[in-house]
Amino acid sequence: MLGQRHGWPVPVGGAGQLTAALVRRLEARGGTLRLGTPVSQVMVRDGRGRGVRPAEGEPLLAARAVLADVPAPALYGGLVGWDHLPARLREDIRRFHWDHATLKVDWALSRPIPWAAPEAAHGGTVHIADSVDHLTRHSADLTTGVLPEHPAAVLGQMTTADPTRSPAGTESAWAYVHVPRGIPPAVLRGTMADRLEASVERVAPGFRDTILDRRVLAPTDLERLDRGLVGGALNGGTAAPHQQLFFRPVPGTGRPDTPVAGLFLASSSAHPGGGVHGACGANAARAALRSQWPVVRHLRRAGAAFRTEPNPRERTRTWPSDQS
């Protein structure tokens, strides 16, 4: 809704410039970025996250907190073992619901897209769908596992939004479409990519004649490039009501806090979900800073003590031998 009301801003020079700006800010504050260092474990001692253990090299200790920018199923039962987590969480994560898979196509075009509707030529982001009925049919195909014949899509005109993206007079564009999970990648890279181009051609006659080159990314390709895009899911878990707000990522959460003190979920699996807004990480950072307040630390210790106190109804009873 914010995008529709205020526009969809894009970084000049490409999306990587947004990451570069964040890294500059981190380094200006004395932070260090370490790349190519997979983490195999979040170290937990006495119920608190103490740091992370890389796949190779020495452990990295945390002065204040650990912020995990990974999908919830990769954190719970993955980076943090089940022996450090409540038993109920295992069942909740087993029911974790991913969002639909995604097929993305990038195009290098010889000229701007020849839209039948002239107004579309000025939009950085264009949604392609004939009607609400069209969107309903597409959603039904996803639910029933059918490959959409006439896909609804989101398309970005990058040079229109930022002239530095390609040479003058040309266009750099992309589009993505949601697809059912489990479709073979070869089918998606061929049949589905062609159907996506046909959808654009239908509302922009002559579009295919402008294509100089294209790159097709199936769900498996997206996950290979970013392990957080599990099965080509862009949202870190479905955005349906049963997994939003205080149900995200599992019922009763809705905050970046985790059952492990000093460990915070900073990925799109946390509220408010996927999007180029940084809200999940910002929420986790604020929660980590608040956790250092004396009153918050006192309440957490009290809560931990309460959770470890046996439930009177579950205490083991000792019976006299004649009643055993």
Image (tube, rainbow, N blue to C red):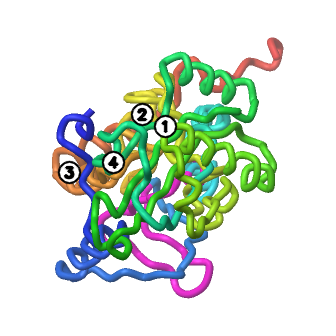
Residue 179 point in image, percent of width and height: 66, 39
Marks 1 and 2, how far apart at CA:
7 Å
Task: Provide the secondary structure element on which disc 4 rests.
Answer: helix
Label 1 crowding class (10 Å Cα cut-off): few <14, some 14-19, many 20+? Answer: many
Marks 3 and 2, how far apart at CA:
17 Å
Marks 4 and 1, how far apart at CA:
38 Å
- Closer to us: mark 1 or mark 2? 1
- Closer to us: mark 3 or mark 4? 4
Task: Provide the secondary structure element on which disc 2 rests.
Answer: loop
Q: Which residue is mark 4?
A: 121
Label 2 crowding class (10 Å Cα cut-off): few <14, some 14-19, many 20+? Answer: some
- First in sequence, mark 4 or 2: give its number: 4
Q: Which residue is mark 3?
A: 290
Residue 157 point in image, percent of width and height: 38, 55
Quadrant into which the C terminus falls: top right
Q: Nearer the viewer, residue 57 or 95?
A: 95
Quadrant into which the N terminus falls: top left
Answer yes or no: is residue 116 visible: yes
Residue 40 point in image, percent of width and height: 60, 70
Q: Nearer the viewer, residue 178 or 291?
A: 178
- Residues in magenta, as a range: 48-75
Label 4 crowding class (10 Å Cα cut-off): few <14, some 14-19, many 20+? Answer: some
Q: Which residue is mark 1?
A: 249
Question: Can you tell which quarter of the image residue 256 is in?
Answer: top left
Q: Which residue is mark 2?
A: 253
Instruction: Determine contact: label 1, label 2, CB under 8 Å.
Output: yes
Residue kind at label 1, given as amino acid type: Pro
Question: Can you tell which quarter of the image residue 165 is in?
Answer: bottom left
Q: Is residue 136 magenta?
A: no
Marks 1 and 3, how far apart at CA:
21 Å
Residue kind at label 2, given as amino acid type: Thr
Rendered residue at 53%/80% (across/down): 37
